[in-house]
């Protein structure tokens, strides 16, 4: 890349196609790299009926899964993420940049409100596309999953549970993702300006800002993520009460009754560990691909 590029000024004039393609490439990169930790997070959040599926921490889960099921088990479901993450992130970043521009986020003095609005709007659009893929991903991640193929899982879940199975967690996903994204983008923009006030090209700045933003947002929204996982994996559970759970409030009641306040923090460590490097990588990839595509 040539020196002297006004890197931070690129979002204001980059085309929608550039933003969407950059977002798609960044999303696939982000999810694929951190997928094994995400698998551990899912398993730690599920209320397991078998002692073999109860884990005391990230290290314990990694060791037991890899030794008893093989390393491939930690990657089960990654194909669903790859299929969904590209289009979903393309919509996410395309919507973010478009709404940010319309709301005046690229003008002085309007950044906080504009970036929060843009981040929330982007999430509503992308989650509608990604939610079914996320359901299939988690069904494939759980202990002793019956599924080895994304398309088989789609067919079986649809046949047994109907279309509602793919969207029962969507309200909870939005309740989690809208504040997650608003916090993430707001912290990211703030950190970026704090660390790089000259707006010069700085990959390290994007990695640090993205990592901090991802970690903060992941920690804040973990209770909702626990409820989302319970809803998305209900059809794979052998627990009659969990199989009957009908929505977010039902999920909250089950979590509270079975595990108390600590239940809402299930999987927080791997969730933060996933989002910090994945968000750092996502923002670094996004900004890099955006510049690379424009320079072709």
Image (cartoon, rainbow, N blue to C red):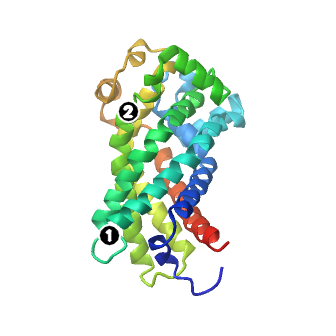
On the image, the x and y values in percent for residue 113 come to 28, 63
Q: Is residue 237 visible?
A: no
Residue bearing the label numbered 1: 104
Question: Toward the viewer: 51 or 172?
Answer: 172
Relative to 38, residue 18 above or below: below
On the image, the x and y values in percent for residue 88 come to 52, 47
Q: Split into 4 quadrants, where in the image is the C terminus?
A: bottom right
Q: Of the numbered discs in the image, which one, if any, rests on residue 227?
A: 2
On the image, the x and y values in percent for residue 244 come to 38, 16
Find the distance from the CA under tag 1 to the CA under tag 2: 35 Å
What secondary structure is marked by label 2?
helix
Q: Earlier in the sequence, mark 1 or mark 2?
A: 1
Relative to 158, residue 33 above or below: below
The quarter of the picture where residue 197 lies is bottom left
Question: Toward the viewer: 99 or 83?
Answer: 99
Left or right: residue 250 versus residue 184 is left
Q: Residue at x 70, y 33 (%)?
A: 67
What secondary structure is marked by label 1?
loop
On the image, the x and y values in percent for residue 147 come to 64, 24
The quarter of the picture where residue 253 lies is top left
Q: Residue at x 64, y 33 (%)?
A: 65
């Amino acid at each position: 890349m040539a020196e002297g590029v006004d890197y931070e000024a690129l979002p204001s004039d980059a085309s929608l196609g550039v933003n969407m393609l950059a977002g798609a490439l960044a999303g696939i990169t982000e999810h694929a790299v951190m997928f094994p930790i995400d698998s551990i997070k899912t398993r730690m959040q599920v209320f397991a009926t078998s002692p073999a599926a109860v884990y005391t921490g990230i290290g314990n889960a990694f060791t037991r899964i890899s030794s008893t099921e093989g390393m491939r088990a930690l990657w089960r479901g990654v194909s669903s993420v790859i299929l969904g993450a590209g289009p979903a992130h393309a919509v996410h970043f395309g919507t973010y940049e478009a709404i940010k521009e319309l709301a005046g986020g690229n003008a002085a003095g309007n950044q906080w409100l504009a970036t929060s609005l843009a981040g929330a709007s982007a999430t509503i659009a992308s989650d509608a596309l990604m939610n079914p893929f996320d359901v299939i991903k988690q069904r494939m991640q759980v202990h002793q999953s019956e599924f080895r193929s994304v398309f088989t899982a789609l067919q079986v879940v649809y046949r047994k549970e109907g279309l509602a199975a793919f969207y029962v967690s969507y309200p909870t996903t939005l309740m989690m993702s809208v504040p997650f994204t608003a916090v993430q983008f707001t912290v990211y923009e703030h950190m970026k300006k704090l660390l790089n006030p000259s707006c010069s090209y700085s990959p390290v700045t994007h990695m640090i800002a993205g990592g901090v933003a991802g970690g903060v947002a992941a920690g804040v929204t973990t209770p909702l993520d626990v409820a989302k996982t319970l809803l998305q994996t209900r059809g794979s559970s052998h627990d009659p009460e969990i199989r009957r759970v009908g929505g977010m409030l039902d999920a909250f009641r089950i979590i509270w009754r079975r595990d108390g306040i600590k239940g809402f923090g299930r999987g927080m460590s791997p969730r933060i560990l996933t989002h910090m490097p994945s968000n750092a990588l996502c923002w670094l990839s996004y900004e890099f691909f955006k510049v690379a595509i424009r320079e072709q």
